[in-house]
Amino acid sequence: MGLIVQKYGGTSVGTLEKIKNVCKHIKETKEKGNKVVVTISAMAGETDKLVEMAYALSKSPKEREMDLLLSSGERISSALVAIYLNEFGVKAAALTGRQCGIVTDSAHTKARIKNIDAKKILNMLEDNYVVIVAGFQGISEDTGDVTTLGRGGSDTTAVAVACAIKADVCEIYTDVDGVYTADPRIVEKARKLDKITYEEMMELASLGSKVLQIRSVEFGMKYRMPIMVISSYTYNPGTLVTWEDENMEKALVSGIAHDKNQARITIVKVPDKPGTSAKIFGAIAEKNINVDVIVQNASEEGYTDISFTVPRNEADKAYDLLKSIIKEISASEIEVRKDIAKVSIVGVGMRSHPGVAAKMFGTLAKEGINILMITTSEIKVSCIIEEKYLELAVRALHTAFGLDKE
């Protein structure tokens, strides 16, 4: 018996038949004596359809209205789940983000949760309800407008609600059966991990892994909420995201991540003087464009080149923004390159094992893969390379760091 939060992704509730199967599993969990809160994503493809309709009517729809529009997908699927649970003999009720007391900042389409007033959820649990929470949404603290948490935001909703109600575990049901050492579609010998640390999962999520949204892992780490990634088709034990233990440190590298959604922007001949970088990256931050890898060349005759990566789908937006900035700072020109990708190695064991980066660079060199940019943290090394070499790089690194072995 326990207090469990379950999250079901869009593919898990993609059809009415799949919704019925999800409801059967929720009922089984409830009948074991557990109190259950469920977070639901929009049905697979529904969000994309809504986006397409909006852009068919406007080239630049207002973000406030987009949030109101896109939040409807999760409300529909949540209501359908609650309807069938009640038909199935389970007392259930669906709640919107507003009804759940999920309060966010005012950054439309990318809002961050500031607070959750969980009183209504807790009261309904005491009344023996299964509470169905529409994922991906909340209301802004300042205006009370509907906000959304960005793609994958239902993961964040689930973990945040689990933390707010002090659940025993947050179970993320998806179309994969856990976290793998690499993408199984690229690496045939990729293996499912039984456990992974919050830090490793955060790095993998930030580096391109689509299993969990990074903010959901941040919530879990901050409040020490165990997160279990499970297949919604088999319901077999998946991968537990948890705190670090001694066994986890033995593995040099836990996984290989990759990300094709990369573009490199280079500002050529930037005057090398105080405040220049602040103007460039301050303007980008104001537009909520995420910057990843940054490289500044050595100064030569008072000028330097600054290169950085942004999500490929935001490269044009960044370019348009910077056209006016380069005039202001008297830089020469802007170059954009979109045929790049990022490959990364991640592992808490890297803290206590020197030479990991050198091994990665040597492995890529043996395959004739040139490294364009490099960034590191305590438990990861990432390289920007040409996109055409990405799959080769992932497979070579997976083998080099012993991840092919059982």
Image (tube, grey):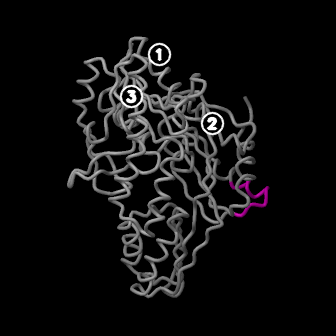
| Residue 28, numbered circle | 1
Give whichever of discs 1 and 2 has the lower sequence position.
1
| Depth check, front residue: 63 or 186 | 63
| Depth check, front residue: 237 or 36 | 36
Q: Local crowd at mark 1 within 10 Å, few (<14), some, or many (≥20)?
A: few
Residue 313: image location, x then y, percent: 53, 64
Q: Identify which amino acid the numbered label 3 is placed on.
A: Ala
Q: From which residue to which does the magenta span run?
A: 361-370
The image quarter containing residue 365 is bottom right
In the image, residue 121 above or below residue 77: above
| Depth check, front residue: 10 or 157 | 10
Q: CA distance from mark 1 to mark 2?
A: 28 Å
Camera-nearest label, 3 or 1: 3
Q: Identify which amino acid the numbered label 1 is placed on.
A: Glu
Whether tag 2 and tag 3 are in contact, CB under 8 A, the answer is no
Q: Is residue 89 magenta?
A: no
Give whichever of discs 2 and 3 has the lower sequence position.
3
Q: Which residue is mark 2?
A: 180
Q: Which residue is mark 3?
A: 82
Q: Considering the numbered disc 2 on the image, is that residue within a helix, a strand or a loop?
A: loop
Q: Local crowd at mark 3 within 10 Å, few (<14), some, or many (≥20)?
A: many
340 vs 378, left or right, is right
Quarter in which the N terminus is drawn:
top left
Residue 391: image location, x then y, percent: 72, 52
Residue at 58 percent across and 35 percent down: it is 175
Residue at 27 percent across and 48 percent down: it is 139
